[in-house]
Structure formats: structure tokens, C-alpha cells
Amino acid sequence: MKCSVDVLTSLSRSVWRQAALALIVLWLAILLLFRETASSIVSIWINNGTYTHGFIVFPISLWLVWKKHDILVRYCPEPFFPALLFLTVSGFLWFIGQLAEVNVVPQFALVFMLISSVVAVFGPQISKIIIFPLFFLLLAVPFGEFTQYKLMEWTANFTVLGLRLSGVPVYSEGQQIVIPTGTWSVVEACSGVRYLIASVTVGTLYAYLTYKSLKRRLIFICLSFLVPVVANWARAYIIVMLGHLSGNKLAVGVDHIIYGWVFFGLVIGLMFWIGARWHDNNPDMLVVVNEQFPEFSNKKISLGGLIFSGLLILSLWPIALWQLQIDRIQISKIASLAPISGWNVVDHALPTWTPKYENNSASQHWILENNQNFIGLFVAAYRNQNKDRRLVSSINKLVVSGDPIWSKVSSGRSHIQFNNRDLEVHTAELRSVSENQLLVWQWYWVNGLWTSSDFMAKLYTAYSRIIGHGDDSAVVIVYTLKKSTEATSSILEDFVKIAAPEIEKTIEQTMRIE
């Protein structure tokens, strides 16, 4: 027996209402069970101007879905149980990210949960129609600041090149640029990461609305990555030249920022104007090839089972994380450093400098001397890590931007022997305003594993928590005054070979505190 069009329409509306209710239930459950992650995203939107655009990503996605409502009403939601696998994988990624204390992983996982629940409730046919609005939600995740240092390096290098080609004498070291009329520094605000993130967000939306060809969309999105980077190089060069040619009367105060955003706006506007020349007519049009409605007899039962299964999967990961929480007695101090053959602990005989490893559980700074060679040794321990107290974090640096005394002028890696094992360490050169230079080596200890890799440190922290060994970790930093690079490295290498057993013993004794 065939149903009339009116009956089909009535059934269609009923199923859409049921599906919408089911999605609301799942989204509320996600936001409730993973509320700390959701809160961390919103907190970054509020406190970091780079990611304020996050507030409009969800409304834009809803608007993009609404633009397709004439097409969507031709279909009816069909519960899609295989999508629960995506929900499970997203939950697992959130779980691992929480254990490793990598904020961005749980944040991306949360958005993937929201996307997976849409696919599970509405089915692949409808999800395919709104695939762009769904994945546009990923741009709400505050992500990308890890590129800052590399962008700063590129900007400084291009500015120096531009100045030299313009005939301006220039001396540079790291992000410091010295010209006859003054000294300029490429700091975080000059990296262009804000321009990059803003351009990619707007450019991705523009590409979707302007083109229907996937090739054209991808090309324009690639341009939205490339153009702001190159534009920021040009912006930095122009600002330095304006300051130089005006005797430091222009582009040195608030107008420095204003000129930057005006220039960026002009460049992005030009990019959109050029892109519009190849726009497609009616890029949002979609040919509907199947207007027949599915059977609805078992929809209530299957939708109910989907909701129950989804809630069960979602609740699994917070419970698993709760089971692994081990709040051990906090470390109050670093254990004493045993005597190191040939080296004596002395008062400060090195330029005053302390690594910026914030919110550690305990830290200790020693200065040691041997035949007028001085070595600084810094150890900071971390236990019961959370979003505010983490070993590997963007706020933990050798030198923070804007430090009035110290700046990092170069960085790299080196291989050393540490207690009969090969170890790669981070290296850096620091310079003070009084022209003192330090050569610095840095690496991590994570529950017995020695590494200089941020990724390995995070991964092993997660593994240690899973097997019940907690998250005890530490950073080790040794440094000395730079002479020649070879001589200085030799001093550090000799010290580390002798001191390695005592450094390791000190950390292990510190972590035995219960």
C-alpha cells in the first residue's frame, strides 16, 4: 500500500524531529561529559585574540546547513550505527590527549565527537550534503601557535634580506635586527600567526561559497595559507623601512600595529578580488538524484538504540580517565646533588639567568666550578600534571618573548653521551643586553626515559599513566658561558659525562618522595 504525499511529508517531519532531538541529547551529553575540554576551548577564545573567531564558527556552520535546507528536506534521517566507530575513536583520542596533557588533542577529539554524532543520527546521505559545514567546525579549535617560532624566523630572515637589497646596512642575530637608526626585534606579535589563522578561516569559507570545483577550492585554500605568510614578511620589511626612513617617527608605536592590519586587509582583499574572477555560478547547487523516502517503521527503535549506544561509548572515556587518576603526594624539593668529581658547588659566578619553567612541583639551580670553568645546572620536577602544571608546555621556555635582559639567538640539536647511553639534546645560544652569551643544553626525564623530544615525552607520560606509574617528569638544563663553539661544547660534554650518574640519582631520589 502506497502512502500519499501528505503522509510521507508527515512521516518525514516526524523523523526529522526525532533525529534533531536525538542529536541534541548526544551533543548535550558530549558537552557535559567533556565539559572541561569544552571550557578550555571557550576560555582560549575569550583570552587569546588570535582565536576570537571561534565564537562565530558554529553560527556560520549552522547558517551553511540552513542554506541547504531545501535540499535536505528531500531526505529523511537514517540512524547509521557504523558512525559509532568514529565516536569511539574520537573518545580514545580524547583519552590519550588527556593522559599526555596535550590540550589540542582532546579539543580536536571533542569536535570530532560532535561531527560523528551528526553522521550517526542523520546517516551518510545527509552528512555528505553538509560535509563542509561539519568539518568547518574544526576551525573552532584553537590550533596553530606552535608555528610561531618558525614564522618569526622566516619573517626575520626576509626582513634582513629586504633591507640588504635596499642598501640598508644590517646586522642580525636570531630575531634581533640592528640597522643604523635603531634595533628591531621580531617577537610573537610579528610572527603573523594571527594573520595566518584569520586568512585560513575566511579563505576556507570563501572558497566553499565561491567555487563548486574541488580543485579550485583546494587551490584557493592553499593560497589562504601562503599569502598571509608572504604578506607578513612584506609587512615587517615595510614597517622597518618606514621607521628607518622617518627617523623612527613612523611605525614605532600603536601605528605599527595599525599599519600591519591595514596592509594585511588590503592584501587579503586583493586575494579575494582575484579569486572572484574565477568564481562558479551557483556553487551551492546540488543535483538530487533520489527523492524517494526510506521506510520509517523501525526508526524509533533504532534511534533509541543509537542514543543508548552513543551515551555508553561517550561515558566510557571519562570513567576510564577517572580510574587512572593517581594523586600522589606533591614533591616539595629536589634531592641533594651528590659531589661530582672535580666540580665544586659555588655561588653565582655566571650571569644571572633562570629558565622559565613555570608552575613546577620543585626546582633547583646549581652553579659548579672546575679550573675556572663554570657550569649552570637546573632541574625542575613535575608531578600530578594538569593544564596548569605541565612539563612540556608552550609557556615553558628558556627565554620568554620580551625578556628585558636575555634573548635566544639560535637553536639546534646535538648528540651526547649520558650515563652510557646516546642522547640527543636541544641546544640554544642566549645573548644578554651586556653581550654575555650562554650555550645551553636541555633534555627531559619521564619515568626513567631520557629524551629531548616533546612528542616522546608526551607519549611516554600517557603510557606511564596507563600502566599505573604516574606522570613523574623532569627537565634538565646545563649551560655555560660561550667561548668558541667547540671549546664550550667540549666543556659541557666533559661535565655531562662525569655528572650524568649524579644527575640521574638526584632525579630518582626526588621522585621517591611519597
Image (tube, rainbow, N blue to C red):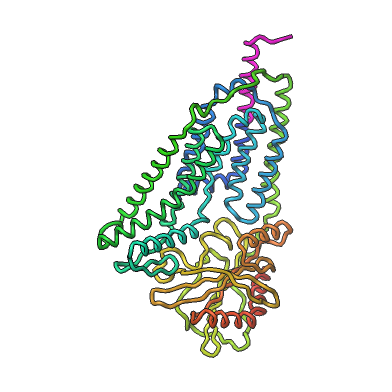
Q: How many numbered dots are placed on residues in this image?
A: 0
Residue nearer the viewer, 424 or 59: 424
Residue 374 lies, in percent from the top left, at 52, 84
Magenta segment's dominant SS is helix
**Could you tell whether 268 is left or right of 441 in the image?**
left
Q: Which residues are magenta?
A: 1-22
Where, by quadrant of the figure, is residue 113 drawn? top right
- At horizontal 67% and vertical 74% (from top left) the residue drawn is 509
Q: Position of residue 138 (x, y in %)?
A: 56, 42
Does any portion of residue 332 appear in the rendered image?
A: no
Drawn side of residue 511 relative to residue 280, left or right = right
Left or right? Give the position of 272 relative to 95.
left
Judge whether residue 218 can be spotted in this image: yes
Q: Nearer the viewer, residue 490 or 366?
A: 490
At horizontal 57% and vertical 87% (from top left) the residue drawn is: 344
Task: Establish if 333 lies above or below 91.
Answer: below
- Quadrant where the image shows the C terminus: bottom right
Per the image, is 19 magenta?
yes
- The image quadrant that residue 456 belongs to is bottom right
Quadrant for the N terminus, please. Answer: top right
Depth check: give the residue in front, 452 or 278.
278
Residue 345 x %, y %: 55, 84
In x, y percent, where is residue 336? 61, 79
Q: Is residue 92 magenta?
A: no
Nearer to the camera, 101 or 459: 459
Q: Identify whether 319 is placed above or below 354.
A: above
Residue 330 picture quarter = bottom right
Q: Residue furthest bottom?
A: 371
Residue 138 higher or lower than 77, as above or below:
below
